[in-house]
Image: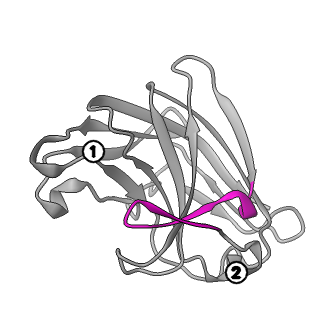
Amino acid sequence: MNRLNLPWLMVCMFSFGSQEGGLEEWSTVDDRVMGGVSLSRVVAADSCMRWEGMMSLESNGGFVSVRSPWERGQLRQAKKVTMRVRGSQGTFALRLATSGVYYEPIHQVGFDVDEVEWKTLTWSLDEFETTVMGRSTGSKFDAGDAGDVGRIGLMKNDGQPGAFWLEVDFIRFE
C-alpha cells in the first residue's frame, strides 16, 4: 500500500498494489474473536488489495473485516471519500473508527459491487451512519470530526454466508 499525503490535492489516499511493503499493516478481524468460524485474509494482487474468505453464520458468527493501522488525524481536512472496487455479490461497508475499542461507535456506509466491472463510488463523510455493535444509532457522522478518525476498514456482515472477495484499487479522502 502506498499512502500519499498531498495536501494541495487530497487529504489522504490509500493506493493498493503488489509493491513491496504494501499491506502488512492491514489486519483482518473476523467473528472468530467471538466464537464464530468465519475467516478472511488480505493480499496484494495485480495493483489492488484483494480481501477474500468465507463468511459463516455458524456458532453465532456472521462477520468478516479488514482494517488499516491506527493513525489519528490523517483525515482532518476530509469532507468526502472515493473508492474504486469490484467483488463478489453482497453488501460491504466502508467504516471509519474514532476509537480503538470495539464497543464504541463506528461510522459506516454500505455498498454493493460488480464481479466484472470496477465501480468508482463517492460519499460525503456526512453520509456515514453511526452504529454501535452493528446497530444503527439513528445519527450520522459529523464530517467536522474527521480528524478524530484513527482507522478505516471494510466489513461484510450482510447475512449471506459463503465465499466472498473484494478488490480495492484505491480509497481517496478529499
Q: Is residue 137 above or below residue 76?
A: above
> On the picture, is 95 further left or further right than 66?
right
Residue beneath the point at 68% across and 81% down:
147
Residue 37 visible from this viewpoint: yes
In the image, what residue type sits under mark 2?
Answer: Asp
Residue beneath the point at 64% across and 60% down:
128
Mark 1: few/some/many CA within 10 Å (<14, 14-19, 20+): many
In the image, what residue type sits under mark 1?
Answer: Ser
Magenta-drawn segment: 124-139
Relative image position of residue 14 (x, y in whole percent): 61, 56
* Cβ–Cβ under 8 Å for marks 1 and 2: no
Tell me the quarter of the picture where residue 143 sits.
bottom right
Which residue, given by chain and number where applicable, does mark 2 sit on?
145
- Picture mark count: 2
Which residue, given by chain and number where applicable, does mark 1 sit on?
40
Tell me the quarter of the picture where residue 169 sits.
top right
Q: Nearer the viewer, residue 167 or 95?
A: 95
- Magenta span includes 133: yes
> On the picture, is 95 further left or further right than 13?
left
Quarter that holds the C terminus: bottom right
